[in-house]
Amino acid sequence: MQDSFKELIKLLLPEIIVDYFELTSYEKDQEILHLYLKEINSIPKEYRESKLSSKGFFDQITVQDFPIRGHQVYLHITRRRWLNEDTGQVVFRD
């Protein structure tokens, strides 16, 4: 994402979303704004010592956020998951 857009998104979305997700696309209907976000491939800090391999994504979820300038806002969030090769468990960020 371009730096200028990233600065704008920081003003509109919660900090945790900006830190761990990238805006992949958006759609604007008459009074509805859809923002599509995908989690970046950054290993959670609690698993930095483990050997993890990316194993795709969970199903997309949709969350309604606070309105922006009279538009309803929906966040379409796709979270990443990793396989902990030491334990065989699937791990993900809280």
Image (tube, rainbow, N blue to C red):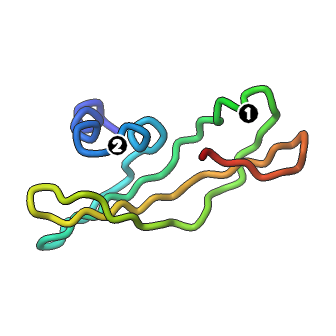
Q: Residues within 10 Å of mark 1 (few under 14, many from 20)?
A: few
Residue 32 vs 81, above or below: the answer is below
Residue 80 vs 58, above or below: the answer is above
Q: Quadrant of residue 19?
A: top left
SS at badge 1: helix
Indicate which disc, 2 or 1, sits on the residue closer to the N terminus.
Answer: 2
Q: Residue furthest bottom?
A: 30
Give the amino acid type for the residue marked by disc 1 in the picture. Tyr
Give the amino acid type for the residue marked by disc 2 in the picture. Pro
Rendering coords of residue 46 (x, y %):
70, 32
Distance, label 2 to label 1, CA atoms, is 24 Å
Rendering coords of residue 4 (x, y %):
23, 32
Q: Mark 2 highlights which residue?
A: 14
Rendering coords of residue 73 (x, y %):
25, 62
Could you tell whether 79 is left or right of 48 in the image?
left
SS at badge 2: loop
